[in-house]
Amino acid sequence: MKDLDLPDGEIVEEQMIKRLAASPSSQVTSCQGYDINGYLFYTATKNKKTVSQNSGARIEALDERTRKSTIYFGIIDDIWKVHNGSNIQILVFRCRWVKHPKGVEVDGYRVTIVDLNNIGYKDDPWVLDSQVAQVLYIADPAKKTKHIVIPGK
């Protein structure tokens, strides 16, 4: 794209795409916490030092195999701000995702239960901040290795 003769464009998105293509950056800032989309997100490491839980993540994505919308649950391990040129910052989360459907179940009361030890998608841990909603995981008293998912806010 760098070699293409793209017009500067009149809308912000067109200008941003041209700037990103012309001069990508490798400058990254790592954060332990970040306030976005009305949620305060923490990394799992920061979460261990606080009384609140803010590292649970949920995304909805199109499953390539089934072509259906699927909800994935995970734990945030890293929060990165990628700096690209003047005033362009992209926030991404690196997550440990629960394997779907094996690590996720919905019981008879429509409560979602996950096995946070059943991790999958290790080759695809990154997600944009705008795609993430926060969830809380509560240890399931009936199933010691499982956690009940509670939606944030």
Image (cartoon, rainbow, N blue to C red):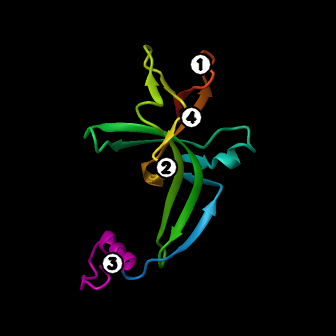
Spatial separation of the CA atoms under disc 3 and disc 1: 52 Å
The residue labelled by disc 3 is 18
Pointer 4 and pointer 3: residues touching (CB < 8 Å)? Answer: no
Label 2 sits on a secondary structure element that is: loop
Instruction: Give the magenta part as a residue range.
Output: 1-21
The reply to whether the magenta stretch includes residue 25 is no
Q: Residue furthest right?
A: 49
- Name the amino acid, label 4: Leu
Question: In front here: 131 or 103?
Answer: 103
Location of the N terminus by quadrant is bottom left
Distance from disc 2 to disc 4, alpha carbons, whole Å, reads 14 Å
User: In the image, residue 16 lies at what x, y percent?
Assistant: 36, 73
Q: How many C-alpha atoms fall within 10 Å of the one at disc 1: few (<14), some, or many (≥20)?
A: few
Q: Residue at x 56, y 61 (%)?
A: 80
For marks 4 and 3, give the CA distance. Answer: 40 Å
Of the two numbered discs 3 and 1 in the rendering, the one whose residue sits closer to the viewer: 1
Q: Decide which of tag 3 and tag 2 comes sooner along the chain.
A: 3
Q: Amino acid at mark 1?
A: Lys
Q: Is residue 40 above or below residue 101?
A: below
Taking the spot 68% from the left edge, 44% from the top edge, the residue there is 47
User: Percent x, y for residue 118?
Assistant: 53, 35
Determine whether the residue tagged by mark 4 lies in a helix, strand or loop. Answer: loop
Pick whichever of labels 2 and 4 is earlier in the sequence: 4
- Residue 59 left/right relative to 31: left
Three-letter code for the amino acid on which mark 2 is drawn: Lys
Instruction: Please give the residue where the numbered disc 2 appears in the rendered image.
Output: 122
